[in-house]
Image: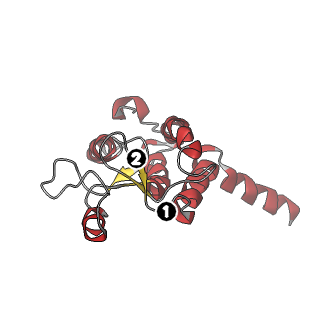
Amino acid sequence: MLSTSESQDESSGTSGGNPQAVRTTGRITRLFTRPPRGLQTLSPHDPSYSGRYEGDPRSRDGAYHQGTVWPWLMGPFITAYAKTFGTKAGRKFATEWLSQFLDHLSEACLGQVSEIFDGDYPHRPRGCVAQAWSVSEILRATSEDVYDQQASTRAASAKGA
């Protein structure tokens, strides 16, 4: 992952040069993006942490928000990262994260993104094998925050009007 000192892009970040915001976001980035498949719902250091989503329904329900990894949360996180550290750093972070995520597209269901993953290594896919919100948020973040399609689409629409 990027260090905050490498990634601050003063010209397009919205942290306003606020060092506290940059440090806080950097700590959150290191803590919650440790797994390669998304953001964790709870820190592994928390006493209520459950690193595996397995067992009977009661066990799975108890683990659902206690450390599982949710890929859909990376969409808003990538957007927030780009707004905090700037477009250039956001694209670099997103590209690095997305490139390590590619292996999953042939892991559980070809071309799809699973609902959740175990918080513990090896971060096995769990839940449904093709989750719409997981797919859509990764696509949105890729198109808007990496390829800047939202801005390009608006510019093309304005020219045609």
Please state the horizontal and vertical placement of residue 122, each as a whole percent of the image: 36, 39
Q: Residue at x 16, y 59 (%)?
A: 48
Identity, as a three-letter code, of the amino acid under mark 1 = Cys
Q: Is residue 1 above or below residue 84?
A: above
Q: Is residue 33 above or below residue 100?
A: below
Dot 1 corresponds to which residue? 128
Q: Quadrant of the C terminus?
A: bottom right
Identify residue type, mark 2.
Arg
Q: Position of residue 118 (x, y in %)?
A: 34, 50
Q: Nearer the viewer, residue 142 or 151?
A: 142
Q: Which residue is mark 2?
A: 124
Instruction: Say which quarter of the image contains residue 53.
Output: bottom left
Q: Residues within 10 Å of mark 1 (few under 14, many from 20)?
A: few
Which residue does the image show at 57% across and 64% down from the upper left? 132
SS class, disc 1? loop
Q: Number of numbered discs present?
A: 2
Secondary-structure class at tag 2? loop
| Spot occupied by residue 18 in the image (x, y as percentages of width and height) | 32, 46
Name the disc covering residue 60, or none.
none
The residue under the point 46% across, 53% down is 71
- The Cα atoms of the two marked residues, 2 and 1, are separated by 12 Å
Q: Viewed as shown, does residue 47 lie left or right of 160? A: left
Q: Name which quarter of the figure residue 68 lies in.
A: bottom left
